[in-house]
Amino acid sequence: MHGGFMHPDDVEPASTGRKWALLASERYCFPILRPLATQAAQRGDEVVWVLRDALAPHLMPGETRLRSRRELKAFSPDAVFATVNRIPPFFPGLQVQLFHGLNLSKRDPRAGQFRIQDLFDVYCTHGPATTVPLQALAREHGDFVVVETGWPKLDTLFQGPGDNADALRRAAAGRPVVMYASTFNEPLSRARECLPVLDELVRRGDRYWLLTLHPMSPPDMVRRYRELAGEHAAYLEAERLQDMLHAADVLVCDTSSVIEEFAMLGKPVVAVGHREPRDFMHDIHSADQIDVAVRSALAAPQARRAGMDAYADAVHPARDGRSAQRVLVAVEAALRGELAPARRRRPKPWRRWWRSWKMLRELLPG
């Protein structure tokens, strides 16, 4: 490791025989955690999933789920990996934070990635934009370590488009492909405002639209967006996000980390009411400006590339598709004591223990 960054040369996929638990409390956790599961299996490590009953149907063949606290205790993982902000502190092993998005602008820093709740031993960061502030907090708190590994979800993105993305391009029949995505967070989501405008633009038929909403979006809104699908548009679930990113020529989005993922591919972004717009975005304030902004972005797709590349380098400089490997190597180093905080974590206030206990009962009801 060099200055907090786990270099590709440090990545050794040798088998360790470790046991890892992957905590999936929401549907969006799967594409973040599955690259980690793939790399762990290649190393000969054992992987299990801890998730809510509602998510069990989304497990793939061969993926093992723990169903009770007794099974968790018997499995005794060396580390538990989470993408959400909270993890029950009762879990055995190191508790590792991977984060559920790249976006640093959704919330006040005290309520987002940089909110320290004394729940994690290792923070695996994406790039300097998250590494530097968290390293400062690690020095202040002294009871966790920070390693810049990259984000496992992007490993498959950097492998290039696959057959599914190519199929979406063929469905466009030569038309420009425009992707629309929105966050579920009501103060930041523009999905309701954009719906009638998108309905009109889709029916016009001169572009092919790829539509998706966050898995936690209101069901009525998801239903109404699904109804736009047809000859000129497709609605896809979040699991198909990377196919959409590769297939699209331009993205229309609000304050969602989908923008950061799209920026990694160097393609233009139209941001509708973004909380903190960046200079590489085609920043608009209302949905009725979407058509003109998309036309401008398609006419000069590389016009703002320099600013986009600089932003992508700050958010996620690693482009080698090996972030999951770096995460496992970093956690292995922590288990061996090569990465260690200055002191042990303090006991948690009772309320935090109670909230975590309720979460634990939901994840492991047996």
Image (cartoon, rainbow, N blue to C red):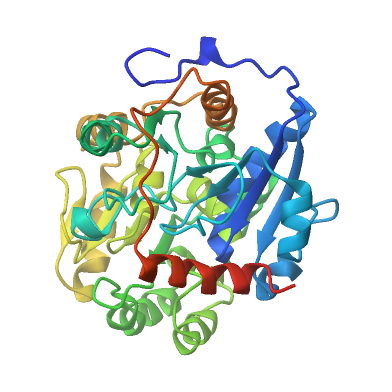
Residue 141: where, in percent of width, then height? Answer: 25, 39
At 45% from the left and 20% from the top, the residue drawn is 6
- Front residue of this view, candidates 77 and 126: 77
Q: Is residue 65 visible?
A: no
Q: Residue furthest right?
A: 62
Query: Would you say 23 lies left or right of 275 here?
Result: right
Determine whether 364 is above or below 119 in the image: below
Screen quadrant of the C terminus: bottom right
At 53% from the left and 55% from the top, the residue drawn is 241
Determine whether 36 is above or below 225 in the image: above
Query: Would you say 281 lies left or right of 186 here?
Result: left
The number of discs equals 0
Q: Residue furthest top?
A: 9
At 48% from the left and 86% from the top, the residue drawn is 224
Residue 353: where, in percent of width, then height? Answer: 44, 65
Residue 78: where, in percent of width, then height? Answer: 65, 37
Q: Residue furthest bottom?
A: 220
Residue 121: where, in percent of width, then height? Answer: 44, 39
Determine the image quadrant of residue 316: top left
- Front residue of this view, candidates 313 and 58: 58
At 46% from the left and 51% from the top, the residue drawn is 248
- Front residue of this view, candidates 151 and 46: 46
Screen quadrant of the N terminus: top left
Q: Is residue 9 visible?
A: yes
Determine whether 34 is above or below 13 in the image: below
